C-alpha cells in the first residue's frame, strides 16, 4: 500500500451532499477524510468516502461476512478535522471493518455501520476500540506523519485510544 501522492485531510471545501427526497437533510463532508488500514499499513484513501477506493473497485459486496471467509481484513477510519485556538487538530475518528477477497471479487461490509461511524467522526467522537494494536499503531503513525502539529493539538480521548 504505497503512497502515490501527498493527500490532504480537508477534502471538500464548503460543499455538502443532500440525502433523501425534498432536501430533507444535509451532511457536510467538508472536514472529513478516510484512511484505509491493512495490517500495519495505513494510507489516506479519499475514494472510501464514495465506496470507490482501489480495493473496493470491481468488488461485489455482501452483508453476510460468512460469504467472504478468505478475504483480507481492512479497516476504514473516518477522520474529521477541526480548528480551535491552538490550531487544526484531529477532532473525530471512527473505525469500521470490511473484508475483501480480491481474487473472488467479493467483499463484506456493513454499510449501515460504516455510515454510522462516519457520522460519529463528523460529530467529533472517537471510536477506535475494535481495531487491533497493529492497526492502531499504523493509524497513529500516519496521523503524526501527516501533520504532527494536528496530532499534538488533538484531544486526549484520541491519544488514549491509540498506543503510546
Image (spheres, rainbow, N blue to C red):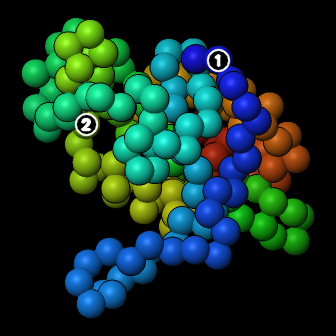
**Label 1 Cα neighbours within 10 Å, binned few <14 / some 14-19 / many ≥20:** few
The quadrant of the picture occupied by the C terminus is top right
**Is 49 on the left-hand or right-hand side of 72?**
right
Residue 55 in the image, given as x and y percentages of width and height: 41, 26
When the figure is inspected, residue 16 is found, relative to residue 33, above or below; the finding is below
Q: Secondary structure at mark 2?
A: strand
Q: Which residue is mark 1?
A: 2
Q: Nearer the viewer, residue 49 or 69?
A: 49
Residue pictured at 50% horizontal, 15% vertical: 39
Q: Which residue is mark 2?
A: 109
When the figure is inspected, residue 119 is found, relative to residue 63, above or below; the finding is below
**Is 52 on the left-hand or right-hand side of 124?**
left
**Is 29 on the left-hand or right-hand side of 51?**
right
Q: Secondary structure at mark 1?
A: loop
**Is 70 on the left-hand or right-hand side of 51?**
left
The quadrant of the picture occupied by the N terminus is top right
Amino acid at each position: 500500500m504505497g503512497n502515490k501522492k501527498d493527500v490532504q485531510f480537508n477534502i471538500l471545501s464548503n460543499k455538502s451532499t443532500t440525502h433523501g427526497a425534498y432536501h430533507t437533510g444535509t451532511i457536510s463532508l467538508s472536514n472529513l477524510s478516510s484512511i484505509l488500514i491493512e495490517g500495519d499499513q495505513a494510507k489516506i484513501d479519499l475514494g472510501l468516502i464514495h465506496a470507490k477506493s482501489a480495493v473496493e473497485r470491481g468488488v461485489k459486496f455482501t452483508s453476510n461476512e460468512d460469504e467472504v471467509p478468505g478475504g483480507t481484513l481492512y479497516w476504514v477510519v473516518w477522520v474529521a478535522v477541526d480548528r480551535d485556538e491552538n490550531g487544526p487538530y484531529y477532532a473525530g475518528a471512527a473505525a469500521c471493518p470490511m473484508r475483501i477477497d480480491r481474487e473472488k471479487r467479493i467483499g463484506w461490509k456493513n454499510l449501515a455501520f460504516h455510515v454510522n461511524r462516519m457520522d460519529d467522526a463528523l460529530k467529533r467522537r472517537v471510536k477506535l476500540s475494535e481495531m487491533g494494536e497493529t492497526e492502531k499503531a499504523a493509524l497513529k503513525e500516519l496521523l503524526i506523519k501527516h501533520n504532527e502539529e494536528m496530532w499534538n493539538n488533538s484531544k486526549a480521548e484520541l491519544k488514549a485510544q491509540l498506543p503510546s
